Image (cartoon, rainbow, N blue to C red):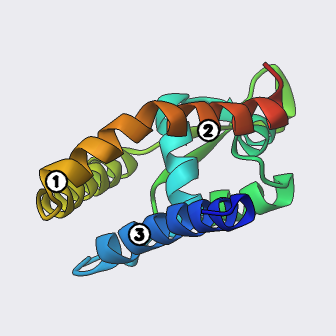
């Protein structure tokens, strides 16, 4: 495969797989679906309770006003709490609610089940090829992260 074609194909396949996973996970939800950025913010806040909005924006590579909008949406939905930072009254600390934890656990369980079912549909050779590609994909993700954040 030509180099340019490979670059474009890989990027397209990775984006397409992620988009299709999100679409499938939205099916059959009894609650309004969360967008990718909302899930990313919830996962970050759950992993790092008390994170500042500005730090969350930096971690997610989003503009501060975009994260502020997500925070307002997720607070209104009952998934986040905004607390005033005692060290800097101008800053807000983000805390997940129990509903956020439940929503994320459900999402992760549904994603895991979806991936198990889809991988089971592949041949053993295809599963082995995907498993063999994981280290290279992790390095690709790490390189992208380092390019933005630094080593």
Residue 129 image-quadrant placement: top left
The one nearer the camera, 70 or 93, is: 70
Q: Position of residue 134 (x, y in %)?
A: 42, 37
The one nearer the camera, 122 or 5, is: 5
Marks 3 and 2, the one that precedes in the sequence? 3
138 left or right of 22 in image:
right
Please tell me how crowded label 2 is: few (under 14), some (14-19), or many (20+) other residues with Cα within 10 Å: few
Q: Position of residue 70 (x, y in %)?
A: 66, 62
Identity of the residue drawn at 72% across and 39% down: 144
- Name the residue beneath numbered marker 3: 22
Quadrant of image for the C terminus: top right
Marks 1 and 2, the one that precedes in the sequence? 1
* Above or below, 85 relative to 106: above
* Above or below, 16 relative to 56: below
- Name the residue beneath numbered marker 2: 141
Residue 75 in sight from this viewpoint? no
> Do the CB atoms of the residues marked 1 and 2 lie less than 8 Å apart?
no
Residue 114 in sight from this viewpoint? yes
């Amino acid at each position: 495969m030509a180099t340019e074609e490979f670059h474009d194909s890989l990027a397209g396949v990775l984006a397409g797989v992620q988009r299709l996973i999100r679409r499938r996970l939205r099916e059959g939800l009894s609650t309004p679906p969360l967008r990718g950025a909302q899930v990313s913010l919830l996962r970050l806040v759950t992993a790092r309770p008390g994170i500042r909005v500005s730090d969350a924006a930096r971690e997610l590579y989003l503009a501060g006003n975009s994260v502020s909008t997500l925070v307002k949406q997720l607070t209104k939905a009952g998934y986040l709490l905004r607390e005033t930072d005692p060290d800097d009254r101008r800053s807000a600390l983000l805390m997940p609610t129990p509903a956020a934890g439940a929503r994320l656990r459900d999402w992760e369980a549904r994603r895991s089940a979806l991936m198990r079912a889809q991988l089971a549909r592949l041949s053993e050779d295809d599963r082995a090829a995907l498993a063999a590609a994981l280290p290279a994909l992790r390095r690709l993700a790490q390189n992208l992260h380092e390019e933005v954040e630094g080593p």
